[in-house]
Image (tube, rainbow, N blue to C red):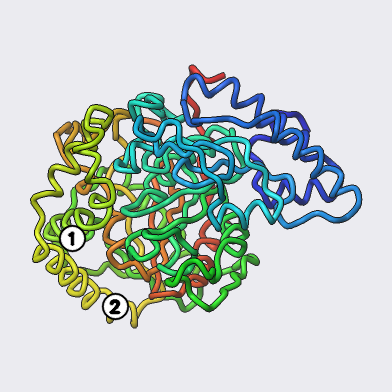
Amino acid sequence: MKNEDFIYLTADEAVKLFVAGEISPVDLMQAIIDRSEIVEPHINAFTECYFDQALKQAREAEKRYQNGSQRPLEGVPLAVKDEFRLKGTRRTSSSLVYKDRVDDETDIIIQRLLDAGAIVHAKTATPEFCLLGSCHSRLWGVTRNPMNLDMTPGGSSGGSGAALAAGTTTIATGTDIGGSIRIPASLCGIVGYKAPYGRNPEIPVFNLDFYSHSGPMARSVTDIAIMQNIISGPDNTDIASLREKLTLDYSPVENLNGWKIAYSKDLDFLDIDADVQRNTDQALEIFKSLGAQVEAIELGWDESIIEAVHHYWAHGWAATIADLLETNRADLTDYTIWFLENALNSTPADYIQSLQTTVEMYNRFGPMMDEYDIFICPTLATSNVPAEFTWPASEVKINGVSKATDEEHWSLTYPFNMLSRCPVMSIPTGLSSNGVATGMQIVSRTFDDQRVFSAALAFEQAFQPPQRILDKRIK
């Protein structure tokens, strides 16, 4: 194999090649580093790189394979979102406020991946405090989509998504409080998983925020399952972590005979771009060819859920950093200031109403899922989201018409943070006319992770994705 063939290996493929002695962890890490040096000036996915240390650890991993003491992810390159703690490294949250913050411990899900043999070679960019569905900040600049540099890779885990799409990491991590794993997964043509609340241990106080999730990002469903089996399970620092340890089966799924799939193209209230609709329709035909019955359904949801989600964020996410308006206003981005000032208008009654809205949503969704195995909808309404998209609204093109809109009108992810116990995976469905990927969400009943993975594995095996298209400026 040539070095350029290494960069898009999945973790599962890489480990098998390591075991067979066909390539070594050093070969893969060096290829990843070489690729990073070529494309990073264009995409800006990384905040910090640890290449020398990673190569040293790759040589140690090589020895483990030689003596048979390798671990499940031994020698696999891992990119860590800048929102996670990694002992001895900076965690800036992409903010000038925390540009010099260095952590003295490692977050549990990162530690579990390290204990499984993964090697961190870089941290990845996020918007300030993970506040956008795009990825730019005053501290780190603009992160761009490798498929079209004018477009965003999504956010807030945009650096992780861009790195996976560009071949500058093998696996990555993300966080998701409104779609921050699934948005970049869709726009970057990769796979991202929001596990049910409590499945993966979180860090206080966000472990008590049922919208908040941390999880895996990769280029295959199998890699997501491998990562998920490693990072899930109870941790005694997180009272909300589920006592049950679920082990996912990721063996091939031949068909979905007898399955019933519910489908909504727009969650009943959003405008969907024709490219997204076309690719989703083609995905549904694949599910039918696998033996599943697909039925369009109505959810009874409307734009009131947008107001509800903002009120909920105001009393959790915004409240954790609200004091920065007084202490560090000059260091904040415009979108952070808007988000925090807007949150000040929310009342405790608004918060309670947001919970009531979630109850009403699930009153429709929960009983419906008694009749279906999975629910499918697009991940995003469009792939035409500019790299500089920001709060409260930016120009976004849907069906050829540009209009100023907010993120909640082009994302279909946040309703499933509200319905947080439902597992959700975003998986690629193809490319749009601008060369950027599209994706769909696979949702199942509460805590039924395996059903999502079985459906995704069957689809992935049957789907023939178009060849990855990188911007001509990236050689």
Label 2: element kind: helix
Q: Indicate the quadrant where residue 403 lies.
A: top left
| Residue displayed at 23% across by 47% down | 272
Q: Residues within 10 Å of mark 1 (few under 14, many from 20)?
A: some
Pointer 2 with pointer 1, Cβ within 8 A: no
Quick check: 220 above or below 335? below
Q: Is residue 256 left or right of residue 134?
A: right
What residue does disc 1 label? Answer: 268
Q: Nearer the viewer, mark 2 or mark 1?
A: 2
Does any portion of residue 433 appear in the rendered image? no
The image quadrant where one finds the N terminus is: top right
Of 118 and 98, which appears nearest the observer?
A: 98
Furthest-front residue in this view: 327
What residue does disc 2 label? Answer: 366
| Residue displayed at 34% across by 54% down | 177
| Residue displayed at 76% across by 56% down | 71
C-alpha gap between disc 2 and disc 1: 17 Å
Q: Position of residue 85 (x, y in %)?
A: 51, 47
Q: Position of residue 156 (x, y in %)?
A: 37, 42
Q: Earlier in the sequence, mark 2 or mark 1?
A: 1
Label 1: element kind: loop
Furthest-right residue in this view: 67
Does any portion of residue 156 appear in the rendered image? yes
Q: Position of residue 392 (x, y in %)?
A: 17, 38
| Residue displayed at 73% across by 29% down | 3
Q: Residue 141 bears which disc, if any? A: none
Q: Residues within 10 Å of mark 2 (few under 14, many from 20)?
A: some
